[in-house]
Image: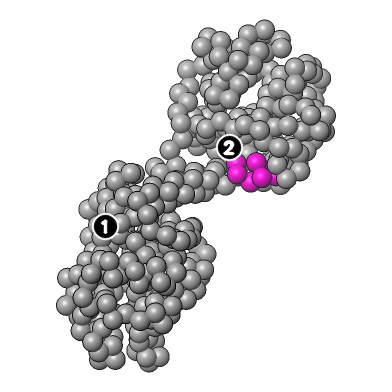
Amino acid sequence: MNVAFLCLGGNIGNRIENMTAAKKAIEGHLGKINKQSGIYETAAWGSDSQNNYLNQVIEVRTKLSAEKLLKALLAIEKKLGRKRGAIKNSDRTIDIDILFFNDEIHAGKKMEIPHPRLHQRNFVLKPLSEIAGDLKHPVLKKTIKTLSKNSKDKLSVKPYDPTKNLRYICIEGNIGSGKSTLAKALAKKMNATFLPEEFEDNLLLPLFYENKKLFAFPLEYSFLIARFKQMQYAFKHEKKLIVSDYSIYKCLWFAKINLTAKDYKLFKEQFKLMLAQLPKPDLIIHLSSATDKLKQNIKKRGRKYEQSISEDYLKAIAVQFEKGVQKLRHIKTINIPINAYHPKLEEASIRTINNFIKENFG
């Protein structure tokens, strides 16, 4: 097996998605990614572009020769929208450079290995030091750590924080799924503002569980108004990332279950008018749990008016939520199955969410 170190970078389009697609193509066709650095952000090198780059270095084990590897990488670049032109250091969706290939030295017109300028670029040296600091440059005869320490490049290279591109995260799920607990924990972890649903102030809720037919429409409409006002106020006055334990879309999903066809049609028209005035979530986290687990959680939290909720009603909500989330193709969503409630559930869920954010936002 040959060992190649590659640098991936890009500064236009969805930078993270492009990088993730490139790595999938590399693993799918060229070889195994053995190591990968963190992702770093820097200003454009050798250019006055205002579009910052994301860069990452990976170590790949491959059966391909250096020549065949280069040809395959150029094909991946082209497939992902890279347009090579006469302008040097122009903006690009993805760039994949071969830094090292074993300890081989290639000095041809079409291929130079090691990369001739890697020792001059912090955006290469920093991530490369992370996974191969003791690797010795076969021409310069110095380790990557030494080259990084002696670099004269002045451009700052910082670990990439994907959360800075996020404004609004919703956590959704059935009654008793643990939305509020997770949303509160996630907001604390991300230094965000927690926006809790104010359902306990709604006096119609206990009445609805006593007589659904009579109170369904006023309840659903009151929730729509309350959520709309709360979200409008939050987005007008709050500058930090917002994490809520509900989304405005749940108004429509519950209305579909609780209202008659005629009332639902009227409700949907009002919902669309309000929806158009609200910002869309960057991410919806959908918690799915078995009905018996939901019943246990509902009983445990002890709200009197919830104790009569039937399993059939919870199942109907679950179906509607699944359908609703699937229709939100314009919003990134992640489903987290909750198989059991335990002390480390929030920690495990937040880890899953963080990994998703790292892979999907750039």
Few, some or many residues within 10 Å of mark 2 (<14, 14–19, 20+): many
Relative to residue 238, is residue 263 drawn left or right?
right
Taking the magenta stretch, the answer to whether it contains residue 24 is: yes
Nearest the camera: 255 or 108? Answer: 255
Question: Tag 2: residue type?
Answer: Gly
Q: Where in the figure is residue 199, as x and y percent of width and height?
A: 23, 70
Q: Residue at x 52, y 32 (%)?
A: 38
Whether tag 1 and tag 2 are in contact, CB under 8 A, the answer is no
Amino acid type of disc 1? Leu
Considering the image in quadrants, where does the N terminus appear?
A: top right
Between 46 and 263, the one lying in front of the other is 263
Residue range (magenta): 19-25
Q: Relative to 188, does residue 324 appear above or below in the rendering?
A: below
Residue at left offset 38%, top offset 49%: 344
Looking at the image, residue 262 sits to the left or right of residue 72; the answer is left
Q: Position of residue 55 (x, y in %)?
A: 56, 32
Q: Position of residue 325 (x, y in %)?
A: 47, 68
Say above or below: 25 vs 122.
Answer: below
Classify mark 2: helix, strand or loop.
strand
Secondary structure mostly seen in the magenta stretch: helix
Question: From the viewer's perspective, is 91 left or right of 193?
Answer: right
Label 1 SS = strand
Position in image of residue 87 (x %, y %) = 65, 31
Which residue is located at x 54 percent, y 43 percent? 16
Q: Would residue 335 be found to the left or right of residue 136 on screen?
A: left
Mark closest to the chain's N terminus, 1 or 2:
2
Residue lying farthest to the top in this orientation: 141
Mark-to-mark CA distance, 1 and 2? 35 Å
Residue 98 appears in which quarter of the rendering? top right
Residue 218 within the magenta-colored segment of the rendering: no
The label on residue 10 is 2
Q: Residue 195, which numbered label? A: 1
